[in-house]
Image (cartoon, helix red, strand yellow):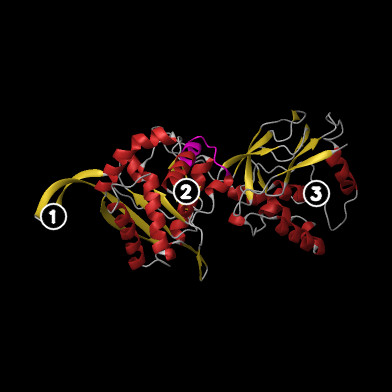
Amino acid sequence: MAQIEVILPKMGESVAEATITTWLKNEGDTIEAEESIVEIATDKVDSEVPAPADGIVTKILVAEGEVAQVGDVIAIISTDGEAPAESAPAPKAESTPAQAAPTNNQPAPQANADFSNSNKFYSPLVKNIAQKEGISVAELDQLNGTGQNGRVTKSDILGYVENRGSAPAPAAAPQPAPAVQQSAPVQQVQPTKSYGDDVEVIEMDRMRKIIAKNMLASKQTSPHVTSFVEADVTNLVNWRNKVKKDFEKREGEKITFTPIFIEAIVKAIKDFPMINISVDGDNIIRKKNINIGMAAAMPNGNLIVPVIHNADQLNLVGITKKVNDLAARARMNKLKPDEIQGGTYSISNVGSFGNVMGTPIIPQPQVAIMAVGAIRKKPAVIETPAGDTIGIRHFMYLSHSYDHRVVDGALGGMFVRKVADYLENWDVNREI
């Protein structure tokens, strides 16, 4: 019988695991190569995993809602054209000898360990090892994991098994040990919190939890400072009003202010390359590529930051097309994992919500982000050779938040001022 393993693929340099959200095929279903078999979610983006070959799904190894590591086998596909009758019992047959011959050092494996009462998260691999080695859930809960958020990793449990085997006394403890283990889960139970009858309790969805975690981590990592500049963008507004109809007719899409702001930021980064950096301990990592992240709001209110890679190599038309494409697919949740990674500097257009300014939070591991506010008409003093006069001009605020560990006020202030200069000195005769 030819069996093909479905492997959780690598989804980016910083993505190590994914949550199985929805199986698109059930055990026994036929599937074609490259057909999507499962939907997954990472802390970056939702995605789908295609089948590596034609066949029948004979085994699903990771249930919906569970987390798998990159490289884990999450399903088995049989390429023989029919589902094998003995595929399900096979794993149990392998474990039978171990259950029939326990030793003094290793207790018999548990048939079906119940993890529902545990307050900790365990990967399917850790659960399988625990079951095979006869480690109870209560015993597993006592382990201090070295993984993210204290999770018990494969190395942790294998190390525990090795030490446990060399010191059998605790495993075969008489009466006191079980009493402690049995009381531990009781101590972890917390009473249900009551909010009263006049409120609605809404649990955060997966992405909102990730956003909350990342925003808190950024504020704890980077001492934020924000500098503000008010820019007169009258020439820019008049130029866009002049070219936008012809641009849409020629290119088939609209030109908004966002790609114009991005172009100005890219120019300023070339003038001040120490903005385009990240921090690793005591080392400053200066990036050669200029990859601009653009915060985009999704229909459900959540936020995602797609990235324009190598933005310095694109002209204004290229940036415009990229901005429109990424924004549209962000709203449809169709972004690829590598399209939301690798940003070196970010922009947030708070003006699209009618806000005049904001104090944006830096997306780690970047060290700066700029918020661009709404463009508003205001009376202003205009200097002319004949003297000062009052006129109606278009103004906007630029808010530049930066990591004060590595970006001082002088650099942060000069950078946002330079962006404003590029916008204020816009060539009204520029062709596009």
The answer to whether residue 424 is seen in the rendering is yes
Query: What residue is drawn where x is 61% and y is 54%?
Result: 13
Amino acid type indicated by mark 1: Thr
Front-lying residue, 186 or 326: 326
Residue corresponding to mark 3: 132
| Disc nearer the start of the sequence (1/3) | 3
- Kindly identify which numbered label has been placed on residue 212: 2
In space, the residues marked 2 and 3 are separated at their CA atoms by 37 Å
* Sequence-wise first label, 2 or 3: 3
* Mark 1 surroundings within 10 Å by alpha-carbon count, few (fewer than 14), some (14 through 19), many (20 or more): few
Residue type, numbered disc 2: Ala
Hey, which quadrant is residue 353 in on the image?
top left
Eyeballing the image, is 79 above or below 164?
above
89 lies above or below 155: above
The amino acid at mark 3 is Lys
Magenta part of the protein: which range? Answer: 326-336
Inter-mark Cα distance, 2 to 1: 50 Å
In the image, what residue occupies the spot 30% across and 50% down?
427
Quarter of the image where one finds residue 156: bottom right
